[in-house]
Image: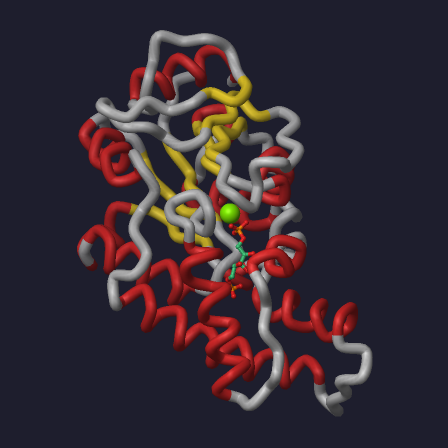
Amino acid sequence: MALEALIFDVDGTLANTERDGHLVAFNLAFKELGLDWVWSNELYHKLLDVTGGQLRIKHYVNDYKPDFTHDDLDGFAASVHALKTKIYVRLVNEGKIPLRPGVKRLFHEARAAGLRLAIATTTTPANVDALIASTLGREALDWFEVIGAGNVVPNLKPAGDIYHWVLEQMNLDPKNAIAFEDSHNGIISATDANLKTLITTNEYTESHQFDNAMVILNNLGEPNKPFIMIEGESTNATYVNVDYLRELHAKHC
Ligand code: XBP
Ligand code: MG
C-alpha cells in the first residue's frame, strides 16, 4: 500500500483557531447581542468537548445557564452562531491567525511529491475558506481535492461521518491515506473511518487520550525547529516531511 493522500483537520491542527479565533468571536457575538455571557479560556477548554459551534452554544445554555429560557433554542443558537461566524471570518481575514509550524511547508512538499490533499473538519465551510485564503492565498483552495466541512454530514466528530464522506468523495482507500488531528474527538472520528492518524497537540488537547495514534507530536516542526515527540517510535526525522510520513505509513498502515 502506497501513501497517496493526506487529510487534514482544521481547528487546532492547521492553526490555533480555537483560542485566537473562535473563542474571541463567540465572546464578541455575545456582546453584540447584549448577552452578558463571557467565556473564559478555562471554560472554553471544557466546552470544546462538544464539537460544532451551535451545539456548543446549546450545551452552554443547558449546563451553565439554567435560568435562560427561549421559545426556540435551536433558532436562537443558529442566529448567535451566524453572527459568530461573520465575526470569525472577519478576524481571520484581518490576518490574526497564522498557520501552525510546518503546515505551509508540508502542503508545498506534499504537492511537489504528488500527494492528494483534503480537509475533514467540523467547522463551518466559510471558516475554512477564510483561513486557507488568508494564510496561503485564495488559489490554495484548489490544492484540496475535497473540503469536507460542517454539516455536509448528519453527525459531527467524534462520529466518523466526515472522514467517511471525504474518503468516498475521493474514492480513496483509507489504507492509502494519513489523517492529521489535534483532539480526542478528531482521532475517534478518523479511526472510525479506518484512517491512521498523526497528532499534533495544542494547549487544549495536550492532556487528551490518543489511542491508535501513529505518533503524537507538539507540532509538525521545521528544519530549524524540530518537533518534540510526545509518544511514538524513535526516528531520524526531526520535522514532518513526506519521507517521514512514508516511514510512518509503512510501519502503521
Ligand atoms: C472544530 C469544532 C468547531 C469549532 C468552531 O472541531 O468543533 O465547532 O470549534 O467552529 P474539529 P463552528 O477541529 O474536530 O473539526 O463554530 O463553525 O462550529
Ligand atoms: Mg481539531
Q: Count how many numbered circles sit on residues in the image.
A: 0
Tell whether 37 sits left or right of 139.
right
- Identify the image quadrant of residue 66: bottom right
For the point 48% across and 87% down, the residue is 32
Q: Residue furthest right?
A: 66
For the point 53% across and 27% down, the residue is 196
Tell whether 249 sits left or right of 99.
right
Is 64 in front, or is 248? 64
Is 219 in front, or is 109? 219
* Residue 92 pos. (x, y %): 32, 64
For the point 39% across and 52% down, the residue is 147
- Identify the image quadrant of residue 88: bottom left
* Residue 243 pos. (x, y %): 30, 16
Q: Is residue 90 above or below residue 238?
A: below
For the point 75% across and 77% down, the residue is 65
Q: Is residue 99 above or below residue 71?
A: above
Q: Is residue 52 above or below residue 234?
A: below
What's the colour scheme? secondary structure
Is 56 in front, or is 161? 56
Q: Is residue 50 above or below residue 13?
A: below
* Residue 89 pos. (x, y %): 35, 70
